[in-house]
Image: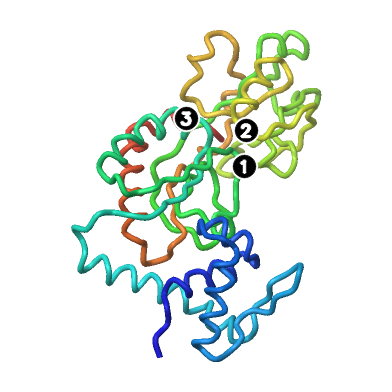
Amino acid sequence: MSIDLDSLKVFARVAELRSFTEAARQLGIPKARASARVQSLEAELGTQLLQRSTRVVRLTPEGEVLLKRAPGFLAEADEIGALFHASRVLRGRVRMELPVVVALKFVIPRLPELLARHPQLQVEICASDRIAAALREGFDLVLRIGAVSETGLVGRRIGESKMMNCASPSYLRQYGTPRTLEELSSHVVVHYAADPVPNFEYLDGETYRELPMRSMVTVDNFEAYEAACIAGLGIVQVPRHGLERHDNKLVEILPEFVARPAPIALLHTHGRSVPRRVRVVMNWLMGVLAPTVGELVPR
């Protein structure tokens, strides 16, 4: 018996996402073709892999067994192909999620050099400060600044960004300048949507703690976070590098109570066996981003 690898790839994506529509979108094929691929695989194996209804797709017990082993089969096939075709033209699509500032300021301006080297490569960039579920949404690579809670991501640490506390002159004129943690009770922070609740993180001896805070505004990207602070809407905790670009629009406060440094890592979703196209793009990104680690400003 032979198994068609393209059909297996479609099955794995549908099974992970529980959706033919989303799997077809991520794979760049019509939904009807995705369905036909899975039906063909089921016919080859002589068993039903998925239970389909108008609202949901569920794995059968046989489908669960195959899904556990499919990533290994696919990665091994890709590695075998790379072994014997190391010099072949690099093809295929690499999907990556990057913070907005990183994508606009560092990656996209350098992208022509990568594509000139590999003209058959397709790169899809999702520029967003929303932390997506990388595996579920079909990304090959993601840049994470801060703690990583999602399992299944593997990669390399680029560095870390030291933090500082800031407020605008107009905010400090209205609320006063806090000198102690106790004085923060009469202050507000700008709430960053990635944090479950508004808080002020600080180092207490050797332990980082979070002080619950009030907020007047919630934002979901870093540029809006800084803009809200400049507008006098609250205190923010931001990377230290880059304060000079705001001239006198932000003032550092409580320097002895800073948040933990934010780790910066480039991660992939392919486990132990990384497709060649993903490995090449990841190495290129490391070369682009590592020298500028101090400027990777999003939280």
Q: Earlier in the sequence, mark 1 or mark 3?
A: 3
Circle 2 or circle 3, nearest the eye: 3
Q: Name the element at disc 1.
A: loop
Q: Name the element at disc 3.
A: helix
Hey, what amino acid is under mark 3?
Leu
Q: Which residue is mark 2?
A: 221
Please determine whether, in this image, residue 68 is positioned above or below residue 250.
below
Q: Quadrant of residue 230?
A: top right
Mark 1–mark 3 distance (CA, rounded to whole Å): 15 Å
Q: Which residue is mark 3?
A: 104
Please determine whether, in this image, residue 105 is positioned above or below residue 160.
above
Q: Which residue is mark 1?
A: 130
Circle 1 or circle 3, nearest the eye: 3
Which quadrant, please, contains the C terminus?
Answer: top right
Mark 1–mark 2 distance (CA, rounded to whole Å): 7 Å
In the visual, does 284 lie left or right of 237?
left
Hey, what amino acid is under mark 2?
Asn
In the visual, does 122 lie left or right of 59?
left
List x then y, in percent, for residue 172.
71, 12
Q: Residue at x 51, y 88 (%)?
A: 45
List x then y, in percent, for residue 292.
37, 31
Hey, what amino acid is under mark 1?
Arg
Query: Is mark 1 in CB contact (under 8 Å) with mark 2?
Result: yes
User: How is the model colour-coded?
Assistant: rainbow
